[in-house]
Image (cartoon, rainbow, N blue to C red):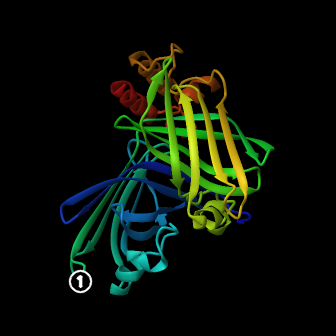
Amino acid sequence: MFVGLTMSATKYVGNLKVTINSEEVNQEAAVSVVEEGGTYTLSIKNFMLGEDTPVGNIILPGLSATDTQDGKKQVSFSGTILIDAGDDPRFTEDDWLGPAMLNPMGGVPVIMTATFNEIEMACHIDIDMTNSPLQQLILVDFNSYDSFNKYQGILTVTINEEVVTQEASIKIFEYNGEYTLAIFNFMLGDDIPVGDIILSRLTPTINNNKKEISYTGVIMISAGDDPQFTEDDWLGPAMLNPMGGVPVVMTATFTDTEIKCHIDIDMRNSPLQQLIEVDFESEQDQPMVGDLDGNGLLEVNDVVILAELAMSGGATAEQLAIGDLDGSGTIDVNDVVLLAGRVMGS
């Protein structure tokens, strides 16, 4: 484990568009940003060209940030990097295009720019291999999903009838009518880190004014970004994925302000010999983020109230919890812009 480090980490889920010589492929991906001592590291783990060409881990360390006019951070990189093999067990060490082909050509020339705050990110990467035998210009554009809800609550983990409860959060992302459910830095109790559970492309049904989503399948759990733990500490990629993946059955019912979720992870037929049941229930009556007038809707009046709070600086603790959309610890112009965008999109 890391000891004595002051670090913060944010993970963004969104759409990754890869353009190769004018041909486009879209896929869901996660980008991590870790801040330590005023410098940043941007990572895209298990980067793929489409669904069947594994490239590897793009890691850009030592980035200095500048502040943009809309309150975001901006980082950039220009140089040649080496791409490590990923840890997706569907592929062997030799399958990863980065170490197998790109690195031996002298490394990978990368130009990257990214802007981000606590809740959203946009990133563009140029990988110019036109002067190599590959003869490709690879353009990567990542945009985090701008519509999501975060639910705080109690996570109950039952392992072979032994029960552990802990505080946790779940995020639900929406994109083009489909949903992604994510539990980042999932833990078994206080001291066993498992990783990120991300269930994607879920189509909802409506029942009693609540959305219902479900998933049945085998997933790969990626390493979390909690700086208390090293890459090798995470149980998902270190132990569960190499067993052939993680069989998951999930059902969830949610609104904008509450969620109930149940997940079965049945590893009884594996060397682990465990049935892991996960139940999450959000805190009751938690307010909708951005709903400053408390009527259960996001509307123009909420934007007006938030703008007044941004100008006066006189927000109460309750208003700050509802109105600090970018997680900066204050209500400012960027929060007003974010809320206006949500109101216009609702």
Q: Position of residue 215 (x, y in %)?
A: 51, 42
User: For the point 51% across and 19% down, which residue is it?
Assistant: 292
Question: Circle 1 sits in a helix, a strand or a loop, which is it?
Answer: loop
Q: Quadrant of residue 175?
A: top left
Q: Dot 1: few (<14), some (14–19), or many (≥20) neighbours within 10 Å?
A: few
Query: Residue at label 1?
Result: 133
Kindly identify the residue that appears in the image at 36 percent across and 61 percent down: 51
**Image position of 8 with respect to 155: above or below:** below
Residue 47 in the image, given as x and y percentages of width and height: 41, 64
Q: How many marks?
A: 1
At horizontal 41% and vertical 42% (from top left) the residue drawn is 145
The image quadrant of residue 37 is bottom right
The quarter of the displayed image where residue 270 is located: bottom right
138 and 114: which is toward the camera: 138
Visible in this render: residue 81? no
Q: Is residue 165 above or below residue 302?
A: below
